[in-house]
Image (cartoon, helix red, strand yellow):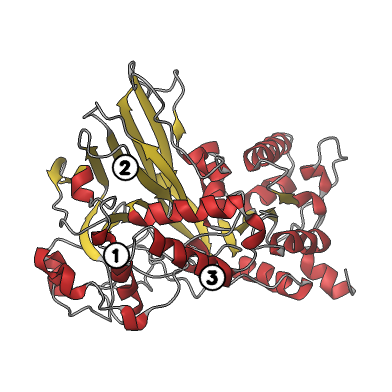
Amino acid sequence: MGDGSYDRTLREFCIPDYILVSGSEGKSVSPVPTCPVIVFINSKSGGQLGGELLVSYSTLLNKNQVFDLGKNAPDKVLQRLYATLETLKHNGDDFAAEIQNRLRIIVAGGDGTASWLLGVVSDLKLPHPPPIATVPLGTGNNLPFAFGWGKKNPTTDIQSVTSFLMNVKAAKEMKIDSWHIVMRMKAPKEGSCDPIAPLELPHAMHAFQRVSSTDKLNMDGYHTFRGGFWNYFSMGMDAQVSYAFHSERKLHPEKFKNQLYNQSAYLKLGCSQGWFFSSLFQSSRNIGQLAKVKIMKKGHWEDLHIPRSIRSIVCLNLPSFSGGLNPWGKPNRKKSIYRDLTLPYVDDGLFEVVGFRDAWHGLVLLAPNGHGTRLAQTSRIRFEFHKGAADCTFMRIDGEPWKQPLPKDDDTVVVEISHHGQVSMLATQLCRSKSMYDPSSPSVDREEDDSTDEELEEDCEERRKFGAADTFKYPDGIDISQVS
C-alpha cells in the first residue's frame, strides 16, 4: 500500500480482524484508530464505478471491513459486528469500546442505497448508532448533495478514495429527522393491493411492505403497510415518470451506463407520460381528485387546501430534490410569519409540503428564488383517498418508485406520515442542510423570495405553464443503482 507514512495514515481507518472475523485471535492494535469505518458499496451502482470502488477500498483498508451490498445484507453485517463489540466490551476490551464509540459508516450507491442503510441503522436500534457518509454513485444523488458530498459520480483511484476518507474523518455529525409512513385499506375482496415495484422489489423497498399478523399496527380485515423516508415522499405524476424510468432501466440495464443517457431517457419518458403537458392527458389526475389531504395543526387535524392544478405533491425533509434542487426555496420573512412557516431545518420535527403542476413548473426551481407551490409545514400529514377515484396511484420514497393499486369499492384507504426519531449523518463544510441547533445556521434567510403567492391562485396555470422553457435542462432526480 505504499510507503510507511501512507500506511500509518490508513491505519486511522482500519479495524483489526479479531473484531471483524468470528474466531480470530484477540489482538488489539495500539493506538486506537481515530476514525474506524465500515464500508458498504453497491457494486451495481454507477455503471462500473461501484465495482471499481470496491477494489480501491479493499486495497486501502482491511478487506473484511468492506462489503458488497449485492452479497452482504447490511443488517446481518451490523448485527454481527455489534454483537462482537458488546461481547468484547463486557470482557473488558477497552480497544473494542473505543472502536464502537468512534465508528463511522460509508455507503456508496444511489439515493435508494443510502436510504436502505439509514433504514437498517434505524431498525436495529444499535447502542451507539454510527453516523453515515454517502458516496454519490446515483444520478440525482440528493442525499449526498444535501450534506456536502457532491452529486457527481466520483473517481475511483486510490488517491481519490484516500481523499474521501480524510473528508469522512473531518466531517461533523448532524442529526436528521426520520419519517414513518403507514398505509391502511380494507382487504380487497379480489385481487391484490400490494405495492408493485418496477419488475422487482429493490432492497430499499423493505421500507414499505405489509406488516406481519403479529405487528401492533395490524388490524383484522385490513391490509396495513409501513415504511419510512429521510429525504422525501412524493405522490403523483413525478412518481409515475420515475416508475416508468426504473421499469425501462431494469428491462434494458445495458443502456443505462452513464448519467447523460439516464437523464435524456428520463426526459423522453417525462414527455411520453404527459408530465410536461399534464393538463392534456386524461390519465393525469390532480391530487385533489385522488385524495383529501389533512395536516396536524396544534393537536388536531385540519384540511389542507390543494389547488386543483397540483398533480404532484412532495413531503420534503432535506433541501435537495431532483438532482439537488430546493423546492421550498427561501420564503419572504414577513410572508412566512403570516402563513405560520419557519425555516426548513432537518432536525426540527417538521417536513415541508410542496406541490407541482407539471414538469415545467418543476423547472422554475432552476431560476433564482424559484420554488414549488408551498402548501404547509407539519409534523403529520394524512391522505384519505376518494372511493373509486382511480384504480392506482404512483408513490416514491427517496428515489424508489412503485405503483400502488387502490381498491375500487373502498373509501377507507389512508396514508399517514408521522415523526419517527432521528438518525445521524456526516456532513462536510459544503453541507446545504441546516440544523436548528447549529449556531452557524441563520435565524432568517439572507436571500429572501420577494415573489407574490401567485402559485396559490387557481387561474394562473395556463399563463405560467411554459414560463420556464428558456431555463430548461435535463432533470436528474433518479438514482442509478440497480439494487437500491
- Which residue is denoted by mark 3 in the rendering? 151
Between marks 3 and 2 in the image, the one whose residue lies nearer the viewer: 3
Q: Which mark is residue 370?
A: none
Asked if one can make out residue 7 in the rendered structure from this viewpoint, the answer is yes
Q: What's the CA distance linking mark 3 and mark 2?
A: 29 Å
Between marks 3 and 1 in the image, the one whose residue lies nearer the viewer: 1
Q: Earlier in the sequence, mark 1 or mark 2?
A: 1
The part of the image, by quadrant, that contains residue 87 is top right
- Residue drawn where x is 41% and y is 27% of the image: 192
Kind of residue indicated by mark 2: Ser
Q: Residues within 10 Å of mark 1 (few under 14, many from 20)?
A: some
Residue 108 x, y percent position in the rendering: 63, 59
Please, what secondary structure does the residue beneath circle 3 have? Answer: loop
Q: Which mark is residue 418?
A: 2
Residue 299 x, y percent position in the rendering: 16, 41
Residue 360 x, y percent position in the rendering: 31, 71
Kind of residue indicated by mark 1: Phe
- Which residue is denoted by mark 1 in the rendering? 277
Q: Earlier in the sequence, mark 3 or mark 1?
A: 3
Residue 478 x, y percent position in the rendering: 49, 60
